[in-house]
Image: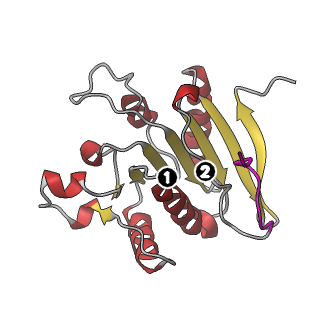
Amino acid sequence: MNDPLTMNDPQTTTPPPEEEADAASGMFMRFYRCDKFLLVPTVVALVRQALKLRMTLNVVGEDSELLRQLDTALWVSRGFMPHVLVSDQPSGSPDFFAQQPALLTTSLDRRNAPTGIIGVNGFPFEDVHALMGNDKTAAHDPLALQKGFVVFDPTPPEIATRCRGLWVRVGREGYRAVLHEHREGKWIETAHNPPLSS
């Protein structure tokens, strides 16, 4: 099995390739720290990798303009990636949304039964908690989240604070996480939560 953290091209901005989800290993999250110019291409690359693994996705972000940029990028990127910008389909039927492999949305949307979630500049941990079946007040049956991704630009202080809090809580709740940082044209694995044993 290839090391999922190995880069074939050290100059590429593509994140480390994902592998088939290992149900026995439990959910884990990958954090990708980069500057704002890499947010969209990094998310596009993650969507492409996840769809190749036949995952269903929520791409969650509070910035509606950034979601619209992602929508455009997914349309024009090499090889169309099927997706829906939820705000553009206010009258879509439940069946329509259920058939979509990727939903771009400002909050968790269960209608396509996501097995993966990509948070753009972070997202409320409660969304992930509900997906992982630990939200006892959820109105719907819990879903089985296999992978979570957080792609963020830490320059705005509020984004850095949000993602730092998410990183801490992921570990506190007993899940695994790894942080990648984009340096000199490549992704570097810089931290694990919980830390790796020496």
Of callouts 2 and 1, the N-terminal one? 2
Viewer-proximal residue, 14 or 8?
A: 8
Instruction: Name the secondary structure under disc 1.
Output: loop
Total marks shown come to 2
Q: Is residue 137 left or right of residue 188?
A: left
**Residue 7, image x and y in percent?**
76, 59
Q: Principal SS element in the magenta part?
A: loop
Viewer-proximal residue, 64 or 39?
A: 39
Which residue is painted at 25% across and 62% down in the image? 87
**Residue 1, image x and y in percent?**
71, 45
Residue carrying label 2: 18
Note whether 196 is above or below 155 in the view shown: above
* Amino acid tagged 2: Glu
> What number is the disc on residue 70?
none
What is the quadrant of residue 167 in the picture? top right
Examine the structure image and report whether residue 103 is included in the region drawn in magenta: no
Note whether 48 is above or below 156 in the view shown: below
Residue carrying label 1: 53
Q: Which quadrant, please, contains the C terminus? A: top right
